[in-house]
Amino acid sequence: MESFDQLVQQYEPMIHKIIHSLNLYKNKEEFYQLSLIALWEASSRFNPEKGSFANYAYAYIRGKCLTELRKNSKHDKTYLYPKEEFWILLEDSSPTQAIDEEILLSCCETLTPNQRKWLLLTVKRGMLVKEIAEQEHVSVSAVKQWRAGARKKLKVLIDDK
């Protein structure tokens, strides 16, 4: 076999023909590189007793490209990548949306100061029970009691309305 550079020069039109015949318009450079790798593999695996190299190289390169196309198609069907506009228009539906503190406190007049503290720190700042306990220098179980009492009172308030 000649050197690989000579092989590339000789079979480059064939590679472009394969890419064109498979209607590869996306990722042309990647398929060109894949075809070069396939040409190199074909040159190292070729057995001259079984036929001409041109036919073998054509089939090998085309087969590699088709295999990659199938893989890409399967990947595209499995994973969805929305366009950028989707992410811009998507509304934030997280539970920690901005809630006005006055509105929150007006609904919670029946809560004790500690229960209000738990509610505000949880809703406004998204803090965990452990974090609240550390900040307020109390035990985790104390904050859990604040939470339980607040939930019970809020549930009664909601059920009454």
Image: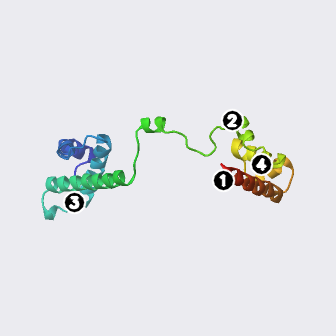
Binning the other alpha carbons within 10 Å of mark 3 as few (below 14), some (14 to 19) or many (20 upward) gives some
In contact (CB < 8 Å): disc 1 and disc 3: no
Looking at the picture, which amino acid does disc 4 mark?
Answer: Trp
- Name the spot of residue 138 as percent of width and height, x first: 86, 53
Looking at the picture, which amino acid does disc 2 mark?
Answer: Asp
Looking at the picture, which amino acid does disc 3 mark?
Answer: Phe
What whole-number distance in Å separates the C-alpha atoms at marks 4 and 1?
21 Å
Relative depth, front residue between 137 and 117: 117
**Closer to the camera: disc 1 or disc 3?**
1
Give me the residue at 87% from left, 50% from top: 137
Query: Hey, which quadrant is residue 56 in on the image?
Result: bottom left
- Secondary structure at numbered mark 4: helix
Which comes sooner in the sequence, label 2 or label 4? 2
Give me the residue at 33% from left, 51% from top: 72
Which comes sooner in the sequence, label 1 or label 3? 3
Relative depth, front residue between 159 and 117: 159
- Secondary structure at numbered mark 3: loop
**Closer to the camera: disc 2 or disc 4?**
2
Q: Which circle marks residue 100 in the picture?
A: 2
In contact (CB < 8 Å): disc 4 and disc 1: no
| Numbered circles on residues, count | 4
